[in-house]
Structures are given as structure tokens and as C-alpha cells.
Image: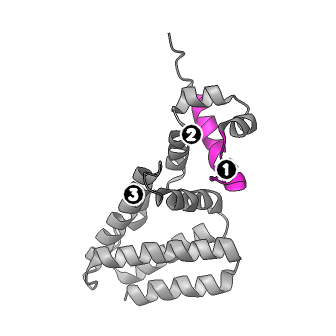
Amino acid sequence: MARPLDHAKRAELLAGVVAYIADHGLAELSLRPLAAELGTSSRMLIHYFGTKEELLVQALATQRPDIAALFAEVTDAETLRARLTAFFEANADGRGSASVRVLLQVLGAACAPAGPYARYAHDAIAVFVTALAAALDRIDAIDDPEAVATLLISGLRGIIQDRLITGDAERTTRAARRLIEQNIR
């Protein structure tokens, strides 16, 4: 008979995964060193999560911001620009960088044919596009809200990645603000 899951232990394990991957990277992720760092065994990680990929997907899900709430009730361009700017700053300045670093690695891995993270990456992008497009649609001054949402999301993601790689806060902040200002008038 299978041992029942200890939900508190499972939550504790998930809390440590994103920080571990941010420090060690996704490409070389191995369950044994991860398990040792988390104070458990690779066998127990498989017991709790099934696969290494599922472990990562579930860990990322615990870190996902509530995008729908971020854009809820936005009805004017000024508020939307402010929320997007705040989102960029919160995720580019280090406060959210551990989960952002991991998410960027997962998105890159999802580009591989039959990548294990393709469904997660697709869903993460779709949630963001849908919520932002709905806010843009409420503004009424935006032609093709879905395309503009895609442009903003992809552009900001690229600028955040640039910031994490180069550390150039001044240039990337200017670029993010310009992207937002030019697309939400």
C-alpha cells in the first residue's frame, strides 16, 4: 500500500525548488543533488511529484502571480501603464528574480521539440495574454488588444531577461517604459 502524501512536507519541498534552480540552473538539474539540498531523497521527490518535470511545474505554479487580479478592473490607460511598470520593476529588480530566472529557463526549454515544459509555458503565456488583452479591450483605444498584449508580454519578458543577464538597470528601465508608453496611449 502506497504511503499517503504529507501535504505539509510537499509544500515545504516546493518552496525550496525554485530557489535551488535559480542558483544551480535548469539545464543540469538532477534529482539527487536537489533532494540532498532539500533534506530528502530523490525517491521521495518521485513519490511526491512523479517526475522531475512535474516537480518543477508544480513549484513554478506556487510562484505564479495572480495576473488576472493585476489587470482586474483596469479601465484606463494610465492605470494599465502604472500596473505594467510596477510588474516590470517588481520582476526585474531582484525581488522576484528567483522565480523569474527559473521561468525564463523553463520558457527556453519549452522551445525544444517535445519539451517537457511546453504545456506549462503555453498556459503561462496564455493566462498573461488573456488577462492583459481583456484590460486593453476595456480601454477601447487599443486596436487588436491580443496583438498588443503579446507585444507587451514578449517585449517585457525580453527586457527582464536582458536586465538579469547584463545588470543594466538604467537602460532596461528606459526600454520597458518606452515599450509600455508606445503601446498604451
For the point 30% across and 73% down, the residue is 146
Residue 54 vertical position relative to residue 4 in the rendered view, above or below? below
Disc 2 and disc 1: Cα gap in Å? 12 Å
Residue denoted by label 1: 28
Q: Is residue 9 highlighted in magenta?
A: yes
Query: Do tag 1 and tag 3 residues touch (Cβ < 8 Å)?
Result: no
| Residue 41 placement: quadrant | top right
Q: Which mark is residue 53?
A: none
Would you say residue 165 is visible in this rendering?
yes
In percent of the image, x 63 and y 53: which residue is there? 27
Point 53% across, 56% down: residue: 106
Query: SS at mark 2?
Result: helix
How are the colours assigned in the image? one colour
Q: Residue 39: horizontal and vertical position, in percent?
A: 73, 32
Query: Hey, which quadrant is residue 71 in on the image?
Result: bottom left
Q: Residue 122 carries which label?
A: 3
